[in-house]
Image (tube, rainbow, N blue to C red):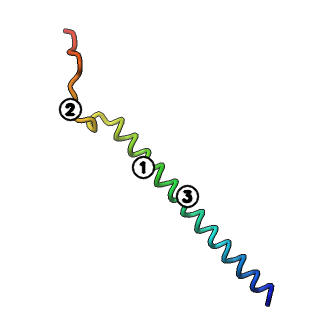
């Protein structure tokens, strides 16, 4: 009986650890996706609005 209880505790601990690792991977995946999206918006010239150039172009 004692061995069975230890096995159950170990099994529950492994399940808990696996769930935690899945949550960490998901958080990292979402963070990377948000960073890529922010970088894409920053690189997009349309996202800056219609800024005027400080100096006019020479003819």
Crowd rating for badge 2 (residues with CA inside 10 Å; few <14, some 14–19, many 20+): few
Q: Residue at x 21, y 10 (%)?
A: 58
Task: Answer with left or right where residue 3 lies relative to residue 16.
Answer: right
Q: Secondary structure at mark 1?
A: helix
Task: Answer with left or right where residue 37 lies relative to residue 9.
Answer: left
Would you say the residues marked 2 and 1 are in contact, meaning their CB atoms lie under 8 Å apart? no
Q: Quadrant of the N terminus?
A: bottom right
Task: Answer with left or right where residue 38 lies relative to residue 27.
Answer: left
Crowd rating for badge 3 (residues with CA inside 10 Å; few <14, some 14–19, many 20+): few
Of the pair 54 and 59, the residue shown nearer to us: 54
The answer to whether residue 56 is above or below residue 38 is above
Q: Quadrant of residue 52?
A: top left
Crowd rating for badge 1 (residues with CA inside 10 Å; few <14, some 14–19, many 20+): few
How far across and down, in percent of the image, does residue 20 sit? Answer: 59, 65
Marks 2 and 1 sit apart, C-alpha to C-alpha, by: 25 Å
The answer to whether residue 47 is above or below residue 58 is below
Marks 2 and 3 sit apart, C-alpha to C-alpha, by: 39 Å
Residue situated furthest top in the rendering: 59
Give the mark, 2 or 3, whose residue is nearer the N terminus. Answer: 3
The answer to whether residue 42 is above or below residue 51 is below
Task: Answer with left or right where residue 52 lies relative to residue 34.
Answer: left
Q: Residue at x 50, y 54 (%)?
A: 29
Q: Residue at x 67, y 73 (%)?
A: 13
Q: Which residue is mark 3?
A: 25
Of the pair 44 and 56, the residue shown nearer to us: 56
Give the mark, 2 or 1, whose residue is nearer the N terminus. Answer: 1
Q: Quadrant of the C terminus?
A: top left
Q: Which residue is mark 2?
A: 50
How far across and down, in percent of the image, does residue 39 sit? Answer: 40, 40
Marks 1 and 3 sit apart, C-alpha to C-alpha, by: 14 Å
Q: Which residue is mark 1?
A: 34
Give the mark, 1 or 3, whose residue is nearer the N terminus. Answer: 3
């Amino acid at each position: 009986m004692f061995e069975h209880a230890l096995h159950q505790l170990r099994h529950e601990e492994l399940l808990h650890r696996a769930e935690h690792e899945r949550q960490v991977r998901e958080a990292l995946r979402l963070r990377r996706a948000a960073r890529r999206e922010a970088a894409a918006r920053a690189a997009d010239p349309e996202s800056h609005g219609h800024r005027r150039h400080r100096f006019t172009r020479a003819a």
